[in-house]
Every structure is written in structure tokens, then in C-alpha cells.
Image: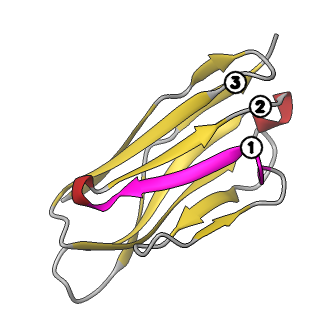
Amino acid sequence: QVQLVESGGGLVQPGGSLRLTCAASGSVFAINAMGWYRQAPGKQRELVAAITSGGSTNYADSVKGRFTISRDNAKNTVYLQMNSLKPEDTAVYYCNADLSSTGWAYYDYWGQGTQVTVSS
């Protein structure tokens, strides 16, 4: 059994900051890429940022320069530091991991989601 548990969401004013954390637990042998996605009401889920096991990163154009993704491989944890938040960043944020429990096959795992609301 594998679980991805997110934390750190909440309500913040425009221009504020939040830090999201996602920890993988259970039967974790290895993790390739980890990432954060978001889904706003009435919209499709979209990639926000991703990071490989080697530390290479990829960002959506809408968050470049404001968000930073990082990970701690020893803790099977990925972070998303979100600065200069805008109302359009409001969404449910989901953690994703390409993870293997055995060292053979890798599968996609998702967290339960954490709400981020940017509003004055």
C-alpha cells in the first residue's frame, strides 16, 4: 500500500505565500518524477511543476518565477513553495508520483488534494 499525503493548503491574500508538502509512505522502493497538479472549478487538471529524481524541474508558464518545486529523496517528500500568489492560482492542488513498490514496475500515484484559495 502506498499513500501520498499532502499538507499546507489554505486561504491566503493575493501576494502572499504558501508551502505545500507531499510525503509518500508505505511500500515505497523508488520514485522517479514527482509533481504538483491543480484543478480549478470547471477546468481540467493541469501540471503546475514537476521534478525528476535527479532534480531537473519543469514549470507551467503561469507559475514560472513565482513557484519553486523541490524534493527530499531521503524522506520521499516533494515541496511546492508558492510566492506572489494570485486569485487565479485558486484550485485544488494534487501531488503525483511515478513510484515503484518493488523496483520493477512504476505506477502513477495521486494524493487526495489540498485546497488553495487566494482571496482578499
At x 82%, y 30%, the residue is 86
| Numbered tag placed on residue 117 in the rendering | 3
**Does residue 14 lie above or below 34 as drawn?**
above
Between circles 1 and 3, the one closer to the viewer is 1
Q: Which numbered disc flags the more N-terminal residue, 2 or 1?
A: 1
Residue range corresponding to the magenta coloring = 63-73
At x 70%, y 37%, the residue is 91
At x 76%, y 55%, the residue is 44
Q: Is residue 64 rendered to the left or right of residue 107?
A: right
Residue of label 1: 66
- Indicate the secondary structure of the residue bearing disc 1: loop
Quadrant showing the C terminus: top right
Is 13 in front, or is 27? 13
* Residue 64 colored in magenta in the image: yes
Residue of label 2: 84
* Numbered circles on residues, count: 3
Q: Which numbered disc flags the more N-terminal residue, 3 or 2?
A: 2
* Residue 84 colored in magenta in the image: no
**Does residue 52 lie above or below 61 as drawn?**
below
Picture coordinates of residue 56, whole percent (x, y): 54, 73
Q: How far apart are marks 2 and 1 (CA)?
A: 6 Å
Q: What residue type is labelled 3?
A: Thr
Q: Which numbered disc flags the more N-terminal residue, 1 or 3?
A: 1
Picture coordinates of residue 82, whole percent (x, y): 65, 37
Q: Distance between the residues labelled 1 and 3?
A: 16 Å
For the residues bearing labels 3 and 2, Cβ distance under 8 angstroms: no
Q: What residue type is labelled 2?
A: Ser
